[in-house]
DNA sequence: CGGGACTTTGAAACCCTTCAATGCCAGTGG
DNA sequence: CCACTGGCATTGAAGGGTTTCAAAGTCCCG
């Protein structure tokens, strides 16, 4: 569905092969790649803070980066989960509007000086278009997040989240090794941790997913997950929805 | 806070003067502007549909454009409100992921052939960077929407929405002429129409806003609006929050 | 003047949040 | 080796906010 960025070749040397399409536009991008500094981070290590001067563009090489804000009431809201191949740090503001930190250990992040890259892009269309692609990808990603946030029920949000994660992680199998905790999921979806847990339990009880472990989930009925539970075509035993005892009677399974 | 796009000069001839910074990068952008076709739309007229082939990039000249999806259950979710100077249609997918239609009468939209503009950008760094700026602006806009969606309470969402709208519309005065209906606000915030109405009523009763008419609102206490209601520093008479009878006793007003 | 779209308000049901408690597991130090 | 600690996950119960259903009011326009 979503194609890959031209500028992905930037990090080609260190990205997993699956994330790097073989393209021929590495004209001057090779030089650009040499400009990147790669840093290795442990979970919780900061990439940048809110209100820091926005003078770098970042690219996740491996691991995971959470971008978030802390609200006045102390709540954390995660606005983006950047995974290998994802760029972040694009903005028109002088300061970053979000903090960013590694979500798991051994996260590798490449960063580029905005000043240098802008100067380069000013006269090099390839670089400029590469940046544009990366920005467009970030936009697609954010819009997808917005769609998930727009779901009304918690099982709907969590289900959409799982599908999106599996799409971005492997896209092939129905098994997910969720890279983040329940707390992270909660802050990503703006619901409470308990609700995340209950939603997963409900999805399991309805037969939509299997929980092999806290971080290991298998998608059983993708369609039902996308539709967030009791839609047309889904028949509940007792007719009520939302009750944790409700179960599927008839449904067409799909990966 | 959010700076302006280089490519804004594209529509310079028809944009309101306030939206067009005087920049010197109109080298070949003038030519590009001539490529745009401008169409005038009435409320509800379609700009593009979901799953249409994504072969145009659009720019709102005047009026307002809603971008949205219709969910399987019939719910409409608005993911973007594009206002004068805003570009939309950026995506890596071959098809648009959202429909777009005029939100008010006499909306003017400029559109550019993606094929032509891509071909031009491939060798012209100015155009490529202009497009990148426009994409970055769309990203900032979407992330802002995400922040609003992340608010927990309805008054918080509606309050943030009002502040964002006034920022994008005029940014100066405390008065807003809301360009959309309660239904649109509801679909934009993913809450029900009734809740939007009740939230506005509550914000009024608390003294945060004044309702001069359904579409005419005045911000009285911007700070309180940003913080979404009962935060520290806000003292309610009876101690409870959320009761429609609750009122502010002491608070520091600000525009 | 009636129709239709929009807005507001009420009441009941439902879902989520919050508070609380339990269980699990890995890492640590006695 | 084992108790202990801290982070994470799950579950229960109560309260509160939102949705849903219903109805009334407003405004514009044909």
Image (cartoon, coloured by chain):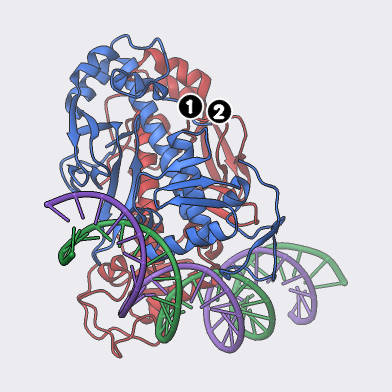
Chain colours: A red, B blue, C green, D purple
The percent coordinates of residue A98 (x first, y second) are: 55, 42
Residue B119 seen: yes
Separation of disc 2 and disc 1 at Cα?
8 Å
Mark 1 and mark 2 in contact (Cβ < 8 Å)?
A: yes
- Relative height, residue C21 to residue D20 (above, below): below
Q: Which mark is residue B3?
A: 1
Q: Position of residue B117 (x, y in %)?
A: 22, 23
Residue A179 vertical position relative to residue A35 in the rendered view, above or below: below
Tag 1 subunit? B
Decide if residue B32 is on the left or right side of residue A197.
left
Determine which residue is flagged by label 2.
A94
Nearer the observer, A54 or B242: B242
Q: Residue at x 35, y 39 (%)?
A: A137
Locate the C terminus of chain B by quadrant. Answer: top right
Residue found 42% across the figure and 23% down from its top: B18
Q: The residue tagged with tag 1: helix, strand or loop?
A: loop
Work out whether residue A12 can be spotted.
no
In front of the other: A239 or B178: B178
| B24, A131: nearer the viewer | B24
């Amino acid at each position: 569905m979503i194609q890959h960025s031209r500028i992905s070749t930037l990090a080609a040397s260190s990205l997993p092969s699956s994330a790097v399409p073989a393209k021929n536009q590495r004209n001057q991008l090779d030089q650009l790649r040499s400009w990147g500094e790669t840093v290795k981070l442990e979970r919780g290590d900061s990439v940048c803070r809110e209100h820091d001067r926005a003078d770098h563009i970042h690219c996740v090489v491996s691991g995971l980066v959470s971008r978030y804000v802390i609200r006045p009431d102390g709540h954390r809201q995660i606005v983006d989960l950047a995974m290998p191949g994802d760029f972040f740090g694009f903005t028109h503001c002088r300061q970053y509007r979000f903090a960013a930190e590694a979500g798991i250990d051994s996260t590798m992040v490449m960063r580029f000086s905005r000043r240098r890259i802008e100067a380069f892009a000013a006269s090099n269309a390839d670089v400029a278009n590469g940046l544009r692609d990366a920005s467009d990808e970030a936009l697609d990603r954010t819009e997808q997040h917005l769609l998930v946030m727009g779901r009304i029920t918690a099982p709907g949000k969590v289900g959409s989240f799982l599908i999106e994660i599996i799409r971005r992680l492997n896209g092939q199998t129905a098994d997910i090794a969720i890279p983040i905790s329940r707390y992270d999921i909660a802050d990503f979806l703006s619901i409470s941790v308990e609700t995340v847990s209950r939603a997963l339990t409900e999805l399991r009880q309805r037969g939509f997913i299997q929980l092999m472990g806290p971080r290991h989930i298998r998608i059983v009925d993708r369609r039902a997950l996308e539709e967030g539970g009791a839609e047309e075509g889904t028949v509940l035993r007792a007719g009520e929805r939302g009750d944790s005892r409700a179960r599927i009677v008839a449904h067409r399974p799909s990966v």
